[in-house]
Image (cartoon, rainbow, N blue to C red):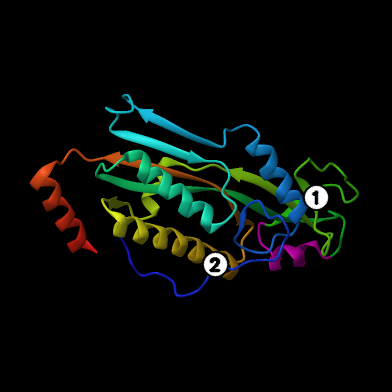
Amino acid sequence: MNQQYSDRDIQEFGYDNQQFILLTEPARYDLLSQVIEDKRVHYAGETVNYIAGTETTSPTVEFFNNNITSPEDCDAFIERVYLHENGRLFKCAFDFGTAIQRSEYMIDPNTVGRDLTEVLHPGRIRYKPYKSTALSKYRTLDEENYSKEITYRIQLPDESHTQNHAPTILYNRESINEFKKYVRSTIIQMQERTQLIDTKDLMVAIFSMQIISYRLPFPGKNMEELIKIHKNKK
């Protein structure tokens, strides 16, 4: 596991009864909250899925938590996964469910300055009727800039993205604590990256988490050797 942890704390944004982890200040907190709440309704709070086998024989187990509201929720979820695997040696990977904020500039096609706007914001102008009010449930005009349209959508956890976060072998209490630190450090890095970039699609919140257990069939001395190799790679 990459142990280059951030020495910063996870930033908090001061909203009351916050139901997700914010990565940056959203343009419309109320709309963001609504899209996350509506998506959560369609999924159970926490699930376990055995891939190609039963609880005892499945080589891969997917754990999903639909209610991540704080770093402490991530810690508790990791702890439950570890207890569920009951001393098994397993490689652990994870991904987050996130909310994406899209900001698009809207102008009157007849406005004289549209060419200048295109130069300043290439590819970010959607030429639609200036007086249009055709806004969907998760789309609104920016309250501070009425030439901008704000839209929110959900990106669910994806197993193909779990390898973006260094998978690690969990085998004892120390490795669990290290994994918790790594997950928190990943959140901090996501906050830092989000706040440094200016892009049309911005990841603004974490609301769920998927952990995948790849069970390793290495008992006895083979297990000890595997753990030793894993430690040497850090």
Residue 122 part of the magenta segment: yes
- At which x and y percent is residue 181? 41, 63
Q: Amino acid at mark 1?
A: Thr
Q: Quadrant of the C terminus?
A: bottom left
Report the side of 39 relative to 173 (left or right): right
Q: Is residue 161 visible?
A: no
Q: Secondary structure at mark 1?
A: strand
Q: CA distance from mark 2 to mark 1?
A: 29 Å
Please name the residue shown 34% across and 55% down the image. Answer: 176
Please name the residue shown 67% across and 66% down the image. Answer: 13
Q: Nearer the viewer, residue 199 or 222?
A: 222
How would you classify the magenta stretch by its main secondary structure?
helix
Q: Which residue is mark 2?
A: 10
- At which x and y percent is residue 130? 88, 51
Q: Residues within 10 Å of mark 2 (few under 14, many from 20)?
A: many
Please name the residue shown 48% across and 39% down the image. Answer: 64
Q: Which mark is residue 140?
A: 1
Residue 15 part of the magenta segment: no
On screen, residue 49 above or below 157 = above
Report the side of 99 relative to 231 (left or right): right
Most extreme residue toward the bottom, as rendered? 7
- At which x and y percent is residue 31? 75, 49
- At which x and y percent is residue 77? 46, 47
Q: Quadrant of the N terminus?
A: bottom left
Q: What residue range appears in magenta?
A: 113-123
Of marks 2 and 1, the one in the foreground: 2
Q: Amino acid at mark 2?
A: Ile
